[in-house]
Amino acid sequence: MKAKAKKNKPVRTKARAVVAAQPRRRGRPPGRPARDDMTPDSRERILDAAEAQFSAHGFWGVTIREVAEQARVDTALLHYYFDTKRGLFDAVFARRAEIMNKERIDSIDAYERSAGSAITVEGVINSFLEPMHLRAAQGDPGWHNYFALVAQVNNTPVWGGETMGKTFDRVIHRLLDALRKALPEADEKDLYWSYHFLSGALTLTLSQTGRIDRLSNGLCKSGDFTAIHARMVPFIASGFERLCRPRSGGRSRK
């Protein structure tokens, strides 16, 4: 009788045994960033890159991949932090708004306390505009990008008004409350229209398009915020005064 052939068993080397004995590590799901990648610095780089891209090309002209490339991070990190492109845009828009809104409210509060019963329209307008003009005058490219972005959103019909409202309405109502003290007999419609005109002039100016530079053949500079502030405050204040103070014998506005 022939002896039964023995089945060859795989040789288990010492090295393979060691590997087999080690506990299996759980890998992170595909596309999910490592914890070490999720640092405050990387988040700020993403916001800075997105701010520059959105201000130059608008919301629809920018992709998540382009922002990731400029920020030098994986696209998965953007999805982790912000979920969608709209989530990223909203985070960019809110970041500097929180700083600017606080500075403007603090400035209006300080002016009201110092002026007391001698409050004036020009004083209120100055306290509202000065924080933004000071930021713009610093020449920080981040703030320049942000102000250009605000100008874009303020002129976006579909969702711009909603975004501006939820971001800035609190400080605008604070401004209007102060103006009511300086213009106690003002018609509410005239106050709101006057702010509407202020908003357009302000966002155009802060975006620094260079239009006035070319129009004036260099006589005026869109980045000269010392000159801008000295002229915008009395210009806007006189508009409020003219529109909001009652006129005896004049034609009523509807």
Image: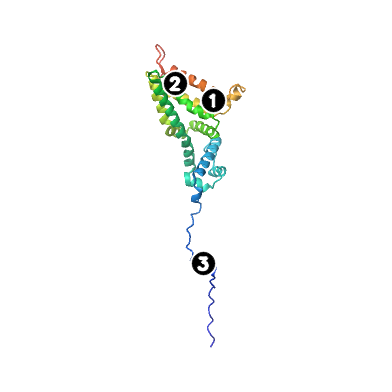
Query: Which comes sooner in the sequence, label 3 or label 1?
Result: 3
Query: Which comes sooner in the sequence, label 2 or label 1?
Result: 2
Helix, strand or loop under label 1? helix
Instruction: Measuring from the top left, give residue 164's x and y in whole percent.
Output: 45, 32
Q: Quadrant of residue 196?
A: top left
Helix, strand or loop under label 2? helix
Query: Which comes sooner in the sequence, label 3 or label 2?
Result: 3
Residue, disc 2: 123
Q: Relative to residue 241, is residue 159 depicted above or below?
A: below
Residue, disc 1: 225
Measure the C-alpha gap from mark 3 to mark 1.
70 Å
Measure the C-alpha gap from mark 2 to mark 1.
18 Å
For the image, the number of numbered tags is 3
Instruction: Measuring from the top left, give residue 129's x and y in whole percent.
Output: 47, 25
| Other-residue count near label 3 (Cα within 10 Å), few / some / many at <14 / 14–19 / ≥20 | few
Residue, disc 3: 18
Give the farthest residue toward the top: 249
